Amino acid sequence: SEEKSLNFIEEIIEEDLKNGKYKSILTRFPPEPNGYLHIGHAKSICLNFGLGIKYNGKTNLRFDDTNPVTEDTEYVDSIKEDIQWLGFNWANEFYASDYFEQLYGFAVKLIEKGLAYVDDSSSEEIAKQKGTPTQPGVRNEFSNRSVEENLQLFADMRAGKYKDGEKVLRAKIDMSSPNMHMRDPLMYRIKHAHHHRTGDAWCIYPMYDFAHGQSDSIENITHSICTLEFIPHRPLYDWCIEKLEIFPSKQYEFARLNLNYTVMSKRKLLQLVNENHVTGWDDPRMPTISGLRRRGYTPESIREFCDKIGVAKRDNLIEFGLLEFCVREDLNRIAHRRMVVFNPIKVIITNYPEGQTETLHSENNPEDPNSGARAIPFSREILIEADDFMEVAPKKYFRLAPGQMVRLKSAYIIKCDEVVKNDDGSIAAIHCSYIPESKSGSDTSGISVKGTLHWVNAADAVEVEVREYDRLFRVENPASEEGDFKEYINPNSLTVVKGYAEPAIQTATLTDRFQFLRKGYYCLDKDSTADKFIFNRTVTLKDAWAK
Ligand code: ATP
Ligand code: MG
Ligand code: MG
């Protein structure tokens, strides 16, 4: 993408490097470990790590773990796994909780400067006193506390003298600012809760606005990139850095990624998991990175998707179809081809010797000359798709029909001679004859046929379970609909079907990617066992949604 024009953040960085503001850049990806990462986070990861790579800088991974109640090491581990799987390496693994002592010191410094005070008001009172965007707020009597008293009270808060909610630390800024975030915002709250890393060492925890910018500054982050909803927080970000006289990290905002037919907030995704609407965070229908991975998405396809959508300054809703387009393109390049019949009907090749099996070969991937070939057994009885046969066929029907010829992929041309029925009128088998000189690769028959069918040898077909997924929600933007977003779940997002696969399928591993010929792209699911193969459909061959 050499000719691609710079996005607005790249423009800023190039300017900063050119005029010597920075010698090198340092970005960070700052997840809160309160859930698994989703495709929106992938956008932020690709952006932050991508800038680090492009400009020869570095990127930190910083866990924004300042809220003890919702955070967990399970999430920390999954986040690290997902970032690495996406193909990125962090320069440092940091935790905002490692800065608790330093952040406490920053708060003390603000108190000493007369720029913070301990407030005993309830959150309701504080909210009321804040006013409205069109009406200035009012300061209460606590804002007049002396520096000494504030220092003592803040130390007592830390020492555990007070219960949750009894006191907060607020910055003293401007109660009539048009920006509500500047109206003496909360810096610290009391929370007697066990933290996944600091244990019970702390019972006061910094608010996002007091932790984030200062953590950026402690790490000397040059470009702190976040999503648009943080625009109104920026003045506070800058105020804290200015008053504390610490490294001036700068915040830049871009539009968050929204995808249609799904939800993208960890809180909502957690509900889907907890209320068993899906089987877990890595359910293949989830927009999580772990779900997409299990579904068969490749890191390359997700990175390509993030690159394609670019870096916008305005919120929008991206089509899920674009993500599918990206994975289809990648899988077409790398997936090994296999034949799997879903709804079988038996074909008996009457002129093929009984008891004989021959080994044919088929290329693993026509897009990749180095991918080799696999062996495919062929004998007198094979299975084809019921859909590939019509007893009374219209003109221009190029599949199998009485009197008609088709090629069996990588095998022979066969001709349908007779349809054998069961008592109930259903088809028991189709009797065909094959043309021995028509073997693929050495065809001397001179016959040309228009249709090529996938098939499997009946005797050694491997029964597999196939999980076919549809969109998780019935509506484009469930989060914006009236009522509970879960009312809009698609009840038919999972269909389980049976398939009969060629024997080569038995070597499949979890990282293999397959194209089931004429069907779509699939991968082995982790629920598989030694004697039960389960496949997830990653995506159909063509865009089935664009109707
Ligand atoms: P969620 O609402 O899903 O919980 P979050 O922003 O609270 O998201 P964080 O763990 O704080 O989750 O996110 C880590 C980083 O990823 C932040 O810098 C955040 O801005 C970014 N991010 C989160 N969601 C998106 C998204 N949909 N598109 C782009 N970036 C995102
Ligand atoms: Mg966040
Ligand atoms: Mg969140």
Image: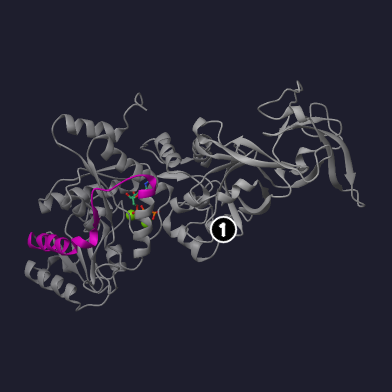
Estimate the x, y position of residue 498 in percent, counting from the top left: 68, 53
Query: Viewed as shown, does residue 67 lie left or right of 359?
Result: left
| Residue situated in front as seen by the camera: 543 or 242 | 543
| Residue situated in front as seen by the camera: 174 or 219 | 219
Quadrant placement of the N terminus: top left
Estimate the x, y position of residue 233 in percent, counting from the top left: 27, 50
Tell me the element at label 1: loop
Quadrant of res 159: bottom left
Residue at 75 percent of width and 27 percent of height: 437
Residue at 55 percent of width and 35 percent of height: 365
Residue most extreme to the top: 446
Query: What amino acid does circle 1 point to?
Result: Ser
| Residue situated in front as seen by the camera: 87 or 166 | 87
Residue 89 among magenta residues:
yes
| Residue situated in front as seen by the camera: 360 or 161 | 360
Residue at 40 percent of width and 59 percent of height: 35
**Count of numbered labels shown in the rendering:** 1
Q: Main structural element of the magenta stretch: helix, strand or loop?
A: helix
Q: What residue does disc 1 label?
A: 528
Query: Viewed as shown, does residue 469 lie left or right of 454?
Result: left
Q: Which residues are magenta?
A: 84-113
Q: Please say whether residue 71 is visible from this viewpoint.
A: no
Crowd rating for badge 1 (residues with CA inside 10 Å; few <14, some 14–19, many 20+): some
Query: Viewed as shown, does residue 157 lie left or right of 269?
Result: left
Query: Viewed as shown, does residue 485 lie left or right of 37?
Result: right
Quadrant placement of the C terminus: top right
Residue most extreme to the right: 423
Estimate the x, y position of residue 343 in percent, counting from the top left: 73, 47
Q: Quadrant of ligand 2?
A: bottom left
190 above or below 266?
Answer: below
